[in-house]
Image (tube, rainbow, N blue to C red):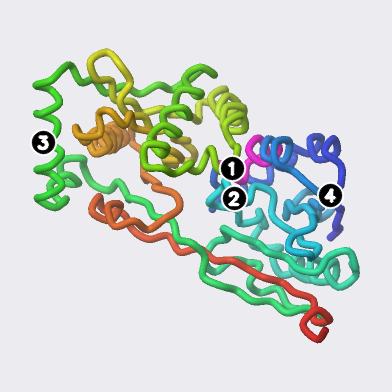
Amino acid sequence: MQLAVIDKLGDLEQIAKEWEELLRHIGDITPFQLPPWQLTWWKHFGSGLLRVLVFRENGRMVGIVPCFLHEWNNRRQLTLIGSGLSDYLEPAIEDQHAGVILEFLQRYLQSREEWDVCDWQDLNAGSRLAALRGDGFRVEEREGQPCSRIPLNGTYDEFWRGRGKDLRRNVRRYGLRAAEAGAVEFKVIEKPDAALLHSVIQLHTARWEAKGEPGMIAANHAAEFLCDVGLLFADRGMVRVFTIHFQGQTAALNLAFLFRNTVFAYMSAFDPQHEHFGFGRKLLHDAIKHCYESGVAYWNFMRGDEPYKFSWGAECVAKSRMFVEKVRLLQA
């Protein structure tokens, strides 16, 4: 086993194909761990110094922990690339090599003076990193913000009959009300261009501004990042923009990523002037129906455990967060 530490963007870009090959052998990978997402995130938001830990056995990559070192709250912190805008960031480590990789990671942390704390968010519950131990630092695993997903089992008719009466009645009632006012059309766009991606972001921002809040995209200054990564994923056939058109205009959208037979519903947007027609429910209903017809296995709601998600049949996806802190800091 060998550990290489990548600290330059050009070197990280050069291993992208090897990185992708590693991910093909690991089962719990999402779009947010793929090189296009990670590299684009770093180009837009990266600060401090790259510290990407690459583990190889006999020259073949068997694990990667993509971090960067930066100042945060007067401490030198190791943070996972993608933090803040990515709900799944479990580092890619082959199971059969996990024990040895953790030993190498332990030695790395013990031998480096440049860091004070690691704050690794959006890890899987039962993360491999939870087994990390070592003299000179303390490891604390905490409960992370959960995600949720709907298993699309059986048929669509069975799924819809299993939903609560109130939900089914509201979807039907609001749908009829909107249809009386104008033409309503559901569409799925599989290859969005930059203009469409910008319109999704603009509609998302308008929705939150109507509530007096900035919204996730504006708060994180993430518009250009999402457009860039959206186009990269679109070239791979991984993007789905679910839309509701009302009276010839876009009333609601959902930007989602399709990966390994799961739809990751990343961002929803609604035109505030049509909120009284409940197009959010209509859009979700039609999108899930489309996923059933397309053979998708899961609809992933991403971060958050809002009650409405569970009325649609979602199950909780537990997450964890790890803090690694040097003992000398605790003793100071």
Residue 175 in picture, x, y percent from top left: 14, 31
**In this rendering, position of residue 82 left or right of residue 50:** left
Identity of the residue furthest to the bottom in this view: 331
Label 3, on which residue? 172
Residue under the image location 51 percent in, 70 percent down: 143
Label 1 with label 2: CB-CB less than 8 Å: yes
Q: Is residue 285 above or below residue 95?
A: above
Query: Which amino acid lies under the numbered mark 3 shown in the image of this protein?
Result: Arg
Label 4, on which residue? 49
Identity of the residue furthest to the front in this view: 212
Label 2, on which residue? 84
For marks 4 and 2, the one nearer the N-term is 4
Q: Tag 2's secondary structure?
A: loop
Residue under the image location 56 percent in, 72 percent down: 142
Query: Which amino acid lies under the numbered mark 2 shown in the image of this protein?
Result: Gly
Q: Tell me which segment is drawn in magenta.
A: 31-39
